[in-house]
Amino acid sequence: MADAKPSTAPEGATGVLVLADGSVLWGRGFGAEGAAVGEVCFNTAMTGYQEVMTDPSYAGQIVAFTFPHIGNVGTNHEDIEATNPHALGCIVREDVTAPSNFRSIQRFDDWLKGNGRIGLAGVDTRALTRRIRIDGAPNAVIAHNAAGRFDIDALLAQARGWPGLEGMDLAKDVSTLQSYQWRDGLWSLGSGYAVDETTDDRPHVVAIDYGLKRNILRNLVAAGARVTVVPATATTLEVMAHRPDGVFLSNGPGDPAATGSYAVPVIKDLLERDMPIFGICLGHQLLGLAVGAKTSKMHQGHRGANHPVKRIADGAVEITSMNHGFAVETKTLPKNAKATHVSLFDGSNAGFELTDKKAFSVQYHPEASPGPQDSHYLFEKFVGMIK
């Protein structure tokens, strides 16, 4: 990691990360050529890099993977959480090798190139992770040029000119533009994703898409629901036009307070109608705002597939998947909102439920993908509450 700003790249360097504080990290570029500006975060998952890169919650972010061997199982058409990658780029320790997995159909670096996403290898990701933990998630530009030509001053100006995620609404950028029905169930080796062939007598869940992951929808189907997805900007009347039995509030990117300008009034209306509600990640934060709680930007955020969460009711510990840079402030929850889960890493709120409504939410990702399956029961809890 170097803090100098040389006019030419070191020998063999074809990629660079320029932080807003002036630090310059040289490496070997892969994937697409070009430059992208965003917030740098780190993810501690040991598997599932394709799911991470396609998670819409990573819009506006550059992901540094702490696991050194990223890309070694290639890519396929099944391990995606959205049609296209939403993370701006990725930073890895080791060069991407030829894939070694029978499900692979394309190299990771070729997949990134085809999707216009930049990769940077040869970076000391441990040092970068420590830096983020100490100083917080920085704004930066990731760039790749096969000839090793970079205008560091221009990249630095771009990094310093980016406003940051606080106050930024990104949900509208990643949400679906029109409503649709979802029928796929959970995936199994050898048969892919199961298609729901049941009749319309299942409880009908309307999922508001603030940047949702597909595996959330698969888990809702597997738990016994019929699912319709609507855009992030759907009004109360548009949601209710689908005659839902329950409403799901999805995960998503950006600042919940910014997204809340149009999402919170709808959620308040749904609560007044006594509509059963389940929220995940951004949906959890928006439900918190709707009942009067506050959210705030975290120092480094929680991102990985190994986060321990304590279930307050019985003391059980769930190992969870997380991806969030904002959090609900527990002390601001109203009296009718009871905290149900807490992060064992830093004590931040990881879930709450309303005592006078059929509504609950969690900060983590019970659908995992990637990650453990300790919390799949929450989907059954939601569908059971509707029934």
Image (tube, rainbow, N blue to C red):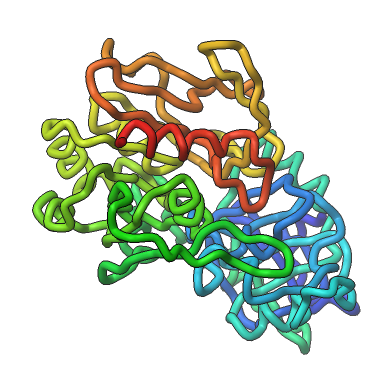
| Figure quadrant of residue 54 | bottom right
Residue 293, given in percent of the width and then of the height, sits at: 30, 24
Kindly tell me whether residue 209 is visible in this rendering.
Answer: yes
Residue 253: in sight, yes or no? no
Image height of 215 relative to 366, above or below: below
* Residue at x 87%, y 70% (from the top left corner): 95
| Residue 325 percent location from the top left of the image | 51, 41
From the viewer's perspective, tell me whether residue 203 is left or right of residue 63.
left
Q: Position of residue 79 (x, y in %)?
A: 64, 66
Check the picture and name the quadrant holding the N terminus.
bottom right
Q: How many labels were placed on the picture? A: 0
**Whole-percent x, y for residue 364 in the image:** 53, 37
Residue 354 lies left or right of residue 158; in this view the side is left
Residue 247 sits in quarter: top left
Q: Nearer the viewer, residue 328 or 154?
A: 328
Q: Tell me if 114 is positioned left or right of 75 in this view.
A: left
* The furthest residue to the left: 237
Q: Quadrant of the C terminus?
A: top left
- 16 w.r.t. 345: above or below: below
Q: Kindly identify the residue that appears in the image at 16 percent across and 52 percent down.
A: 243
**Height in image: 292 above or below 69?**
above
